[in-house]
Image (spheres, helix red, strand yellow):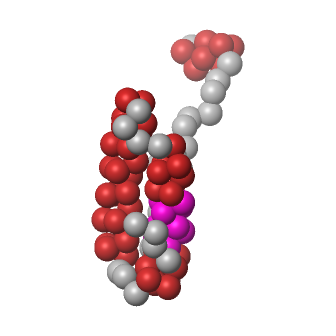
Amino acid sequence: MAYTEKELDGKTLSEISSLLLGCEKKIKELAGDIRTGQAKPADMLALNSDLALLKKMRDKKSQEQGRTIKRGQPTKSSAPLKSYDDYLKSKK
């Protein structure tokens, strides 16, 4: 595929996201082909560089539009842990 930043700059966020999903799918398929010996590991390197560029452009576009991408952030904080003595006191 070999995308360039200039080429991807003209695309919308939804187009980049769909290209990203397609690239991830191709990587999964290629991994199976590498295991069976039908593809070369160099092909995987090319797809990984495309994937990195697509992620970079997706983040750039989402920042331009004021959107945030949640990455492993907890939705709410957990309750503080209590000691066993505190637990016994609360039961009385």
Quarter residue 32 falls in = top left
Left of 81 or right of it: where is 23?
left
Residue located at (53% from left, 49% from top): 42
Q: Is residue 82 visible?
A: yes
Residue located at (46% from left, 56% from top): 47
Q: Nearer the viewer, residue 22 or 92?
A: 22
Rendered location of residue 51, percent (x, y): 48, 59
- Considering the whole magenta stretch, tell me its main secondary structure: helix
Q: Nearer the viewer, residue 8 or 82?
A: 8
Number of on-image labels: 0
Quarter residue 23 falls in = bottom left
- Queried whether the magenta region covers residue 71, the answer comes back as no
Quadrant of the image for the C terminus? top right
Q: Is residue 71 visible?
A: no
Q: Is residue 48 above or below residue 16?
A: above
Q: Is residue 1 above or below residue 36?
A: below
Residue located at (46% from left, 69% from top): 2
In the image, the segment drawn in magenta is 49-59
Rendered location of residue 16, percent (x, y): 37, 71
Quadrant of the image for the N terminus? bottom left
